[in-house]
Amino acid sequence: MTSWSQAEWPVGVRKAVTMAAVAGYGVALAGLILPIRAGEQSFRAEIPTAVLIATVIAVPPTLAALSMRGRVLMLLPAGLLGIAGLLGLLSVLGFLLIIPGLIWLWAYLKLAPSGRYPRKFAMAAVPLLWVGAVAGLFVHIDPLCEQLLADGSVVRIDPAGRGFKTGWAWDIDTSTFSGSGSGSDMVVSESCTSDIVVPWEMAASVILSATAVGVAWLLAGVGASSEPGLVVEGHGSA
């Protein structure tokens, strides 16, 4: 029978990884709130974008948190995504994960077992899956136009009438102007955006993010009984 313990982790390393994970989840929470508060579109239209961004940001701190369950190798993709992936793909929010990413990578270098290179190389699948999750922000163009009416209701209008097109990013010219205005006395304001995240893109991103974490858990679990953080009952500390 197996039980989990953090006893074998150096106290300073354990605290650093934990605090960095908490900070990472804070950034994920910001990724959930900011798109809704800052977006020009209606609350309903911004929810898929907010969920997608929060989900992909939450992947690195989740990997780091689970690494303390006898899966030290999960610190490697956590650190790499924190340092590089989020910095390049999620703009300002990405900068907030640089320090946590460095902490996770530092912890990995201190705790990772020697050898086991096939498993370490296989961990490359985790960033690839994560990039696939982030691609939901870019690969398909879904324009949206909304009008705020005088009675306070919000209605959607056909974006094609404003010159926008729907399709895969490589097939669409996204240079079309996106802005706001009004067209009649009944319309208080009108806003259009060249691309939003739609529910199927959000769902695909959540699935890929969960798959990335699951793959990392499975890969890091092979031979995990010889890594810090795992205690096997009846056999002493591993």
Image (cartoon, grey):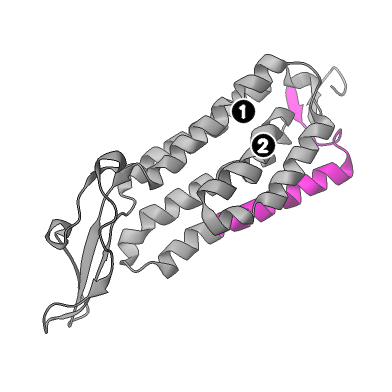
Q: Can you tell which quarter of the image residue 185 is in?
A: bottom left
Q: Nearer the viewer, residue 79 or 62?
A: 79
Q: Percent position (x, y) of residue 193?
A: 29, 61
Image x and y of residue 20, in percent: 72, 50
Q: Which residue is mark 2?
A: 66
Measuring from the top left, give residue 143's x and y in whole percent: 25, 55
Which quadrant holds residue 205? top left
Residue 237: which quarter of the image?
A: top right
Identify residue type, mark 2. Leu
With 137 as the anchor, is 214 left or right in this view?
Answer: right
**In terms of sequence position, does the residue under pointer 2 or pointer 1 come before the other?**
2
- The residue under the point 68% across, 40% down is 79
Helix, strand or loop: magenta stretch: helix
Identity of the amino acid at label 1? Answer: Trp
Q: Is residue 48 visible?
A: yes
What residue would you read off at disc 1? Answer: 217
Let me know if residue 12 is in the magenta part: yes
Q: Is residue 175 left or right of residue 157?
A: right
Residue 200 part of the magenta segment: no
Q: Real-space Cα distance between discs 2 and 1?
A: 8 Å
Task: Answer few, some or many: residues within 10 Å of disc 1's Cα (few below 14, many 20 plus, some between 14 and 19).
Answer: many
Q: Tell me where the magenta segment starts and ends, as one range.
A: 1-29
Q: Is residue 234 above or below residue 7?
A: above
Q: Residue at x 34, y 43 (%)?
A: 201
| Position of residue 15 measured from the top left corner of the image (x, y, whole percent) | 81, 48
Q: Quadrant of the N terminus?
A: top right
